[in-house]
Image: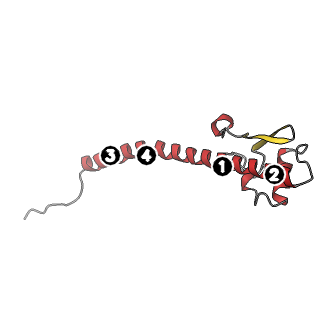
Amino acid sequence: MITKKSGFTFIEIMVVTAILGFLIAIAVPNYIRAREKAAETVCVGNQKTIYTAVTMYILKETDSIESMSDAERLEALTDAGYLRGNKWAECPSSSNDGDYDDYIITFENGFVSNVDCDEKGALHNWE
């Protein structure tokens, strides 16, 4: 009596492994690019929100935030209710989570002229 063993051969397993490796090699770089693009989009959105909040603060409040540091400005905006939470002060690509100083607010003639990302610079430029 001859019995047949069922299962996969070594060659079949190697072919499946090669196909999976090829699919992963294609998928991982696309995933990384998608994450970087999402972080850039969030960062630009944060910059626009901060720009709007600073403009509203300047128009409504009597205190000047121009002479403050960037971290103090963001704290003043949060305290006055123009921003909620500290998430606006942190670039999603930041390697130093929790320092809340990733955005540089530039003034010209008493008004905000630009908000730049200190973490990625030109890669996260909204102008």
Question: Is disc 3 surrounded by few (<14), some (14 to 19) or many (20+) residues within 10 Å?
Answer: few
Q: Position of residue 43 (x, y in %)?
A: 66, 47
Q: Foreground mark, 2 or 4?
A: 2
Q: Mark 1: which amino acid?
A: Gly
Would residue 91 be found to the left or right of residue 105 on screen? left
Q: Mark 2: which amino acid?
A: Leu
Say which quarter of the image contains residue 36. Answer: top right
Q: Residue at x 75, y 44 (%)?
A: 103
Q: Is residue 50 above or below residue 82?
A: above
Question: Is disc 2 surrounded by few (<14), some (14 to 19) or many (20+) residues within 10 Å?
Answer: many
User: Which residue reaches farthest top?
Assistant: 122
Q: In the rendered image, which quarter contains the C terminus?
A: top right
- Give SS at disc 4: helix
Residue at which label 1 appears: 45
What's the distance in space between the residues labelled 2 and 4, CA to CA?
A: 38 Å
**Mark positioned earlier in the residue sequence (2 or 3):** 3
- Give SS at disc 1: helix
- Give SS at disc 3: helix
Q: Do callouts 4 and 1 mark residues in contact (Cβ within 8 Å)?
A: no
Q: Foreground mark, 4 or 1?
A: 1
Q: Mark 3: which amino acid?
A: Ile
**Mark positioned earlier in the residue sequence (4 or 1):** 4
Would residue 46 be found to the left or right of residue 107 on screen? left
Residue at which label 4 appears: 27
**Mark positioned earlier in the residue sequence (2 or 1):** 1
What's the distance in space between the residues labelled 3 and 1, CA to CA?
A: 39 Å
